[in-house]
Structures are given as structure tokens and as C-alpha cells.
Image: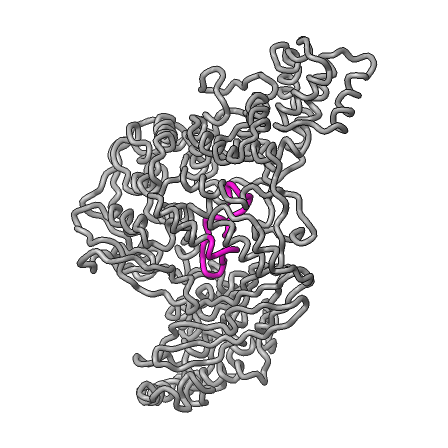
Amino acid sequence: MHVLSSTRIGFALVSLFWGFAGQSWAQTPAGTASSPRDPVTPDRVTFELDVQPILVAAGCSTGPCHGKARGQNGFQLSLLCFDADFDYAAIANESRGRRVFPAAPEKSLLLQKPAGEVPHGGGKRLEVDSRNYELIRRWIELGMPRRATADPELVRVAVEPTERIMANNEDLHLTITAHYTDGSKRDVTRLAAYQSSESVTVGVDPTGRVKTGPIAGEAAIMARYMGMLDVCNVVIPQKKPIPQELYGGLPRHNFIDELVWAKLKRLGILPSDPARDSTFLRRAYIDVIGRLPTPDETRAFLNDPSHDKRPRLIEQLLERPEYADYWANKWADLLRPNPYRVGIKAVRSLDAFLRESFRANKPYDQFVREIVTAQGSTWRNGAATVFRDRREPDELTTMVSQLFLGVRLECAKCHHHPFEVWSQDDFYSFAAFFGRVGFKGTGLSPPISGGEEIIYTAGSGSVKHPLTGKVLEPRPLAGEPVAQLSEPVATPSTPATSESTGRRRRRQSGPAADPQNDPREVLAAWMTAEDNPYFSKVIVNRVWADLMGRGFVEPVDDIRGTNPPSNGPLLDALADEFRRQGYDLKKLLSTIMNSYVYGLGSQPNEHNVADSRNFSRHYRQRLRAEVLLDAVCDITGVSEDFQAMPAGSRAMELWTHRSESLFLDSFGRPDPNQDPPCERTSDTTVVQALHLMNSPRLNAKVSSDTGHAAKLAASEKSCKEIVEDLYLYVYCRLLTDDELKVGLRIFDEKNKNRRQCTEDLLWALLNTPEFVFKD
């Protein structure tokens, strides 16, 4: 008891002294011995500037340790120490201050455990003779002081160098500098956390030492210090030099080619040869309308001698009616909810909205505005179904920011984003745009939610910060609260995450708001403004990934400073062109598909065999489930029967994933119980291979009496013509002499009639990668 009383008295005296010392230090000019520019003096150690960074660097506040949801062994810190008040209370006040002991600082649990002097589940994190140990010890000795009001605040971190071209197996030591509001600086290289975007190509250790590997490529090295980020871009060119004149001779159909060649020249990579006409034909059909060309269409294109047949084909496909169904099917994955949750009629209404939007070639900015500001009956305005499904502001925030801005805010719902600049305040200020969404009519009652519901703008409604309870004004990302705007002002020209400082700037953006109007109108105006840095980039990146096999940024809806694009100048140029073209998706498709790069072959050469992100060749993709099933039906001549659909309907026309289809499920159709957005993967599985080989329904289509195989076998065509036709149906190309010999050999087999041979060959062709993949 005597020791405890003495401790409290000592704590009080030190705290009293600290009040005067802190006040004096706050007036110390930048650059003096006690400023953050120089090593910290023993009589000046603060929690925010000195102690918290050590806890982050040591891993104490990470997810696997005390930063997880409920902490570790009763001790919880905010994730990556984003909440100084919470962390200070946990260390200095919780459990009656048992974690710190000012009378004998070295006996504090805050030091003994990480130093390994008492058992610690997290292992040894501090050396007793280290500077970090001494800083924490001195902080406890001084009475655990907080910061003074005039203390400088961290505004940005800067990594040096920001870019470097390196050789294979070379080292580079990064330097990380913290910059403060008073102009002072501090070297925080040893306290920063590091991560490589391509660890196989370029690695980085906890000290900031970068090490390149044996293969060419590039990577972004993220450095994070107390919620601030910066990036160093590392490029490793090919070892074998390439004559520069070769790049000058590469064809250039538009600006896309120019910017891709510039990137390949920098890396020392040569592109593959162009794809054959038959490969381009099949690729273009699948990319634009999601179906294969017929044999007659293939023959017509291959026999066309004109030099402009590829551009003409693209424009013809963009006017085909199948275009709307195919692209609406893609967006259905991102928006369409479970009909058992929101009701069948509401889902049908949303499906009709999507298809009609693509039939009308609705400008993309209008399409998004109609979704974000949707009101009215879920039976009459399909876009309103989105709000029937996502009913809470936080749910709408994660979906809208991810789909239409490429910003994944979900992490910031609970804590500061670990790889971005967004905080809880940013998340809930954005959520406040949806605070006045109102509902009339029957609510949800799964599994039968059949009633109509009206979405409207309520007269009141707010969103509160979950920790402070403060009511937040609607605020765009990196913008000012709507209530403080007095006149329309421009949105930021570049996202905060692209700034090397990693600073979250509060710029005014969007039009002025009338409190009586729907805040969603203000949000939609800001989102679709021409100089919004996010809006055009994310849709351009998504479309590019659909056509080219991967996006400039992967995942396609995770655009941030620590996940830089593989070709930033090209992403920017495409986004600018998309805006200039009036947000016309068909024109965007035409621009990309008319580039020389789009028509490259997928066969690698000696220079680009390891390239998987710079588009020096075409990256093959497995066909979407619906495209593949429709192709099987077209090739076999036997349609599929779907529940709740008219006879002869195509898989691309399905309005719900609830329609039973083992084929579609095997090839990656989203789970109907999964919440949108659903991003499909193009992975291949053993289940898919076994299904193609053993499916009774597929076998029934191949062997149907009314199918193409039976009709070919019964026709007057020769065996050679049958083999040629099957190759045109399945691969959309002419066969080679060797392939003809193999095909005819099947017809020479004994104990098999002509129809059996035709069916066997068709079945074999359907079970090949050339059919399953878009080349």
C-alpha cells in the first residue's frame, strides 16, 4: 500500500512538472534540439510522436496481436494505433494502470513483456539496450505525458527514392522521412512498415532494404508510418538489350499502342506477333456479344480480303442485339440481389433496368446517377431494388464506393484503413449521403419477400460516428462537408492516394446542397463530375480487364496509391478519352478493340514469356459460365431448358442465378445467396473438366437426334467436310492438315457408324482448352 501511494504521488508530481515542460516545448521553434527534426531529448517524449510509432513498428497493434477486435489477453490497442485516445487509455488507465509503473519504469509490463523478461505470447519485440526501449522507459518515467496543444502534427511521409531502375539481384536501402506541420522532419525508416506489390519480383525486409530477384518486372514498395503512406516504384528491365529502332517500327493504331510500347521499351520487352484472323474473330465475338460466330460468319470473315475488316467487324458487333444481354449479365453480378431476399418481382425489375440501359447505350454517368439516386417503386424502377437490398447507410457506402469509385472503404468502417488514407470519419461522412433514404411498404421477410416497396427521401435522418457519437455531415472523399459548401467547386484533379505525401487533403468538391433535397443528388453530381479522379478510371479499368485478360489495377475495383496501375499513363489517357466521348461504353470498347495491342496473339516470345501485366501479349481467359453453356447449345444445336424462362431461352438471358443449372454452377456462376457485388474468377477446376467429360446433359446434347452431329452424319457431306464443319463450329477456324488426318482417322475406326464418329469427334473438341478459353 505504501509503494502504491508513493507511486501515485510521484506520478502526480511528474505530471505537474510535465504541464510546464510541455507548455514550454510547444513554443520551441522548429529545428532546435528538441524538435522532431533531431533525436528526441530525454526530457521530451510524447505518446503520439514517440511511443505509438514504436508500438506499430513492433507489431503490437497489428491484427494478429493486440490490434485485433478483442485484443489479446485483455489488452487491446486500436489497429495500427489509429486511435490515440483509445490506446493511451488502454496503457495508462485500464486495469488500474497495471501496465505502467512510473516509480520503476523498467518493471512496467509494457516493457517487460515485449523485452522478453516475463512470458509474452507475442515473443520478444524490444531489445533492452535499444533506443526504442529507452524511449518508452523514459516516457513512463516522465508520467506518460500526452501531447501539448501546439505540438506539431504528422502531415506526410516521403520515401526516397520514389523510383528506381534496378538490375537483377540488386539491393536498395529506402529512407522514410516524416514531415510535420511546423516544417520539422524525422527519419522514421526503422519505424515504418513495408510491403511489396510483387514480392516474387522485388522483396523488402522490415528495415526498408529492397532486394530484386532474378526475373524482370516491376513492383511498388509501400512504406507506411502512422497511417501515412508513400510508394517507391522499382523497375527491373530485361537483361538482354533490344535495339531501340524495333520499338519505333511497331504499328500504332491509336494512343493505346503508343503508351503500351513506351512501357515495354522501358522494360526491354518485345510484344508477341499479331493474332490470326480466326483468333481475332472469335475473341471479338465473345468480348462484345458473348457468343461464338457461326460457321457462315467465320467463312465470310476469313474470305474477306479488305484491309479494314477488323474495324468493320467491331462496329457491326457493337450494334448486335446480343450486346445488351451480354453486358447486362456482367453488371447483374455486381448489382443483382437474391430474389428470396428482396422478392422475385423486384429482381425482375432490376434485370429489366440493366438490359434496357445497355440496349439504349445509356451514358455511363447517367446509368450510375440513376442507380445512386433511385426512388420510387421497386416494381417500376428497377434501380430502386438496390436500396431494398442494401438498407443501411454503411452497406450502401461499401458497395457504391467499391463499384463506382474503385475505393474499398470497408476496412475504414471499423478502423483506419491499413493500406490507404481513409479513416472512420471518412467512411461515416460518406455514409451520411444515404442517411435520409426512406422506405414505405412491405419490408423484407426472407425467404418470401414478395411485396412492393417505395424508396424515397425522408425529411430527416443522420449518421453518427460509432465512437464519438457525433452526427456527421455528408462529405465526399477528400472533400469538404456538404453543409459547408456555398457554391459549386471543382473536384480534385488527382486522388489523395496518388500524392506522394499520402496526405488526406480536404478539398471542396461537388455542388452546393439544399438541406431539403436528397443528399444522394449531391453525391451523384460529385461522383460523375468530369474532374472526379476515381469515377472514369474504375470503369475503364473494369472494361479493359474484360477485354484484355487483366486490369491495369488488380483487383479491378481497388484503385489506391499502394496498388498502382501497371500502366498509369494509359489508364489516365483512357479515362480522359472516355469522358471526352460522353461516357459512351460502346465507344470505349471500340477504342480499345481497334488498338494494335488488342489484336496481339497470346503465344509468348523469348522476351515476354514472364510478362503477365504489361500487355505485351493477349492473356487468355476461361469463358464465362453463361457464354460457355450458350456455346455448347449453339454447337450441338440443342437448347437448354431453364426454370421460370420461356422455351429456347439462352443462359445470357437469365434474370436470376436461382435457375437450376449444374453446368453454370460448375463454371463459376455466383452463389445466389452471395451478396453483390460478386466478382467472378476465371480459375479452372477439376470439377469443370469432369463435368465436360461426364455430364449426362452434355452427352444428351451431343447425341441428340435433332442435334448438329446427327444432321451432319445424315447429310450428303463427306467425312472431310464434316470434320471441317465441326472445327468451324467449335474453334471458329479452319483446321490444319494434321488435324484433318486425326479427324479422318476417327471415321476409319471399325465397329462405329458415321454418326458415332461424328459425335465422338464433337465430344473430343468440346473437351479441349481451345474451346474453353478465349484466346
Q: State which quadrant residue 500 falls in.
A: bottom left
- Residue at x-position 26% and y-position 54%: 510
Instruction: Inspect the magenta stretch and tell me whether residue 569 lies in it.
Output: yes
Residue 470 image offset from top left, x and y in percent: 27, 60
In the visual, does 121 lie left or right of 570?
Answer: right
The correct choice, above or below, for 336 with respect to 469 in the image is above
The magenta region covers 545-570
- Residue at x-position 21% and y-position 43%: 458
- Colour mapping used in the image: one colour
The correct choice, above or below, for 130 with respect to 199 in the image is below
Residue 79 image offset from top left, x and y in percent: 46, 63
Report whether residue 133 is seen: yes
Q: State which quadrant residue 447 falls in.
A: top left
The correct choice, above or below, for 276 with respect to 573 in the image is above
In the visual, does 472 lie left or right of 538?
Answer: left
Outermost residue, right side: 750
Question: What secondary structure predominates along the stretch shown in magenta?
Answer: loop
Residue 606 image offset from top left, x and y in percent: 70, 52
Which quadrant, please, contains the C terminus? top right
